[in-house]
Image (cartoon, rainbow, N blue to C red):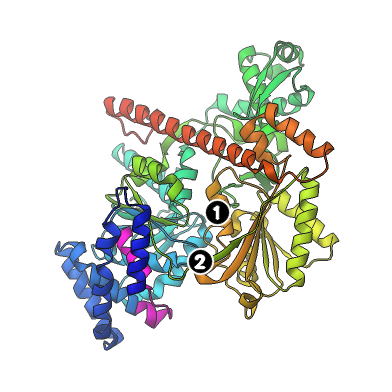
Amino acid sequence: MTGLLQNVSSTLKIWAQGPVRGRLSDWSAAVPAVAALEPELQQFSDAELRKRSLSLRYRAKSREPLESLLPEAFALVREAGVRTVGMRHFDVQILGGVAMHHRCVAEMQTGEGKTLTATLPLYLHALSGKGVHLATVNDYLAERDSQWMEPIFRMLGLTVGAVLTPMNTAQRRAAYQCDITYGTAKEFGFDFLRDRLLLRRMAEGQSNLMAQMLGHTNDASGDKPVQQPHHYALIDEADSVLIDEARTPLIISALPTEDERAEADLYRWTAEAVKQFVDEEHYTYDHEKKTAELTAAGRRLVRNLPRTRALESVGMIRLYDFIERGLRAERAFLLDRHYVVRNGEIVIVDEFTGRMSEGRKWRDGLHQAIEAKEGVEVTIDTGHAARVTIQDYFLRYPHLAGMTGTASDSARELHRIYRLRVVPIPTNRPPVRERLPDQIFGTAEAKNEAIVREIAQSHAAGRPALIGTRSIDKSEILSRMLNEAGIDHQVLNARQVAVEAQIIAAAGQTGRVTVATNMAGRGTDIRLGEGVAELGGLHVILTEMHDSARIDRQLLGRCGRQGDPGSYRQFLALDDDILLAGLGPEKSEPLAELGRTSPGSFDSLGRLFRKAQHKIERRHFTDRRSLMYQEKERKKMQLQMGQDPHLDSPS
């Protein structure tokens, strides 16, 4: 206990002038209160433990404040954890659970057991009998964590469900009827929208038709909403969900009109036409905004392009718009980096997680332009039947909290938008992660060769290595180079979802080499094999900077968990994507030319990469702020018209 209080005191120094001053000190009093109940509960049988839990639930439903129930609730969960999954909550995890009860984002470092910590506030709020949801970044983590933690809740008399993408309506309803429901923010949001649409159609006497349109079953409850009233949401990887994903609203499309169906031919015509356009001659491309604008010569070329009879009636202004959109699809969105083609469909790859974003589409016709570019069936770009932003959806919960390893940089935005305070939780053991000096090369080729050499050294020493890449194509380029060097390795990207668990489980074993996208970042727990700690632990290699420094920190955080040894190094090149995206072509192209023509080290230029990353982060923040303002104005207008702000006006 003394060690914990010392860590709390140290942490408080960081926040001495901040709004959380004194809170950790006050909350730390809950730790001995929970510990004091432990000897008594250890003497209980399993049946007696469950009975004690049900008694606590009765008190909660009788409106006894959850604050007064917290020590006993946390003590019950700690004891159930020992008995069912063989894990006892550390004192710092108890402290993290208290913070998550008090509308905070608990910043807990990698390996500190966020999944186990989450059981504490989830159980406490589930005692109220109202909707308690844990939202995470992908189906894999939602299913894994719900199954992993279910024995704890089951011993205490609570039920647990998980909402996964492939589920039908009956399965979703069953999951939401559980005391605690795990799922992704995306699935929670889309289910909310489907329920709103269903309620409107029910009010209009069209519930059966809408149930069929939305894929609802014909069971007895098929025309009822699936979600329970919102009460408490705990957001895993809170900065990813609430910040990174917040730039894209969740949208359910309306049924297409005949005019919209005819647009498929126009998209296909555009995809062929843009191949004739030359950069700087027919259009200019803005690398920061990722937009294309036709020049006078480009507009003349559009007017002279041959068109089918069906397209002759299309106005010239509209053709200009389609060509510019097609050029953007050609220049800014790359196969196996921003998307993949799977079963004849375009599936977006989320850079923040490295995973496929099932069911999501780019807006404003961009998705259709990419479909035409890749020669797959062009889907219909329709109007919106319903929409909600991540911000708006989670602000519907009276009680909200989060946890992540990288929230401090976003503390101001999290408080401004969600009224959440970021609280750093002390580590259970002091971290011993070693940062090795950055290395900067002139070209990507030289950088990759150096990475392979470093992997070979780590491999020869028996240390496992995790190599983080920004995209699928870059992970596969590095994989080919490792094959040529005769280094046995595993690749983890969006194509290997089926074997993800096996790859992660083995990534910390002696001599193991794992090349991965961001799938190996958030939520993965790489445990060291026998004898690996003595060799120096896991070595993490970052092959590029990401658009957000938080993603880089998530990846390097895979090493040095729970006091284990580990090391990491950042490799960079003067032709890396981040310099072009952050500094623009005027500044980045001379740097790339310098890298191609001048031998030697460029390690002194590291500040330029950080500057580029910071500019991109600011741009993304501006995008999120703009989206918030637009949504606020749109909702205000619809409310003034007496309409549901989440639904478009019925036709």
Above or below, 537 against 211 in this view is below
Query: Dividing the image into 4 quarters, which one contains the C terminus?
Result: top left
In this figure, which residue is indicated by the disc labeled 1? Answer: 553
Q: N-terminal of the two: label 2 or label 1?
A: 2
The quadrant where residue 42 appears: bottom left
Locate residue 501, reporting x and y percent: 59, 67
Q: Which residues are magenta?
A: 80-100
In this figure, which residue is indicated by the disc labeled 2? Answer: 431
Report helix, strand or loop for mark 2.
Answer: loop
Residue at 41 percent of width and 28 percent of height: 630
Residue type for callout 2: Pro
Q: Are marks 2 and 1 in contact (CB under 8 Å)?
A: no
Does residue 532 appear in this view? yes
Report helix, strand or loop for mark 1.
Answer: helix
Q: Is residue 87 magenta?
A: yes
Query: Dividing the image into 4 quarters, which one contains the N terminus?
Result: bottom left
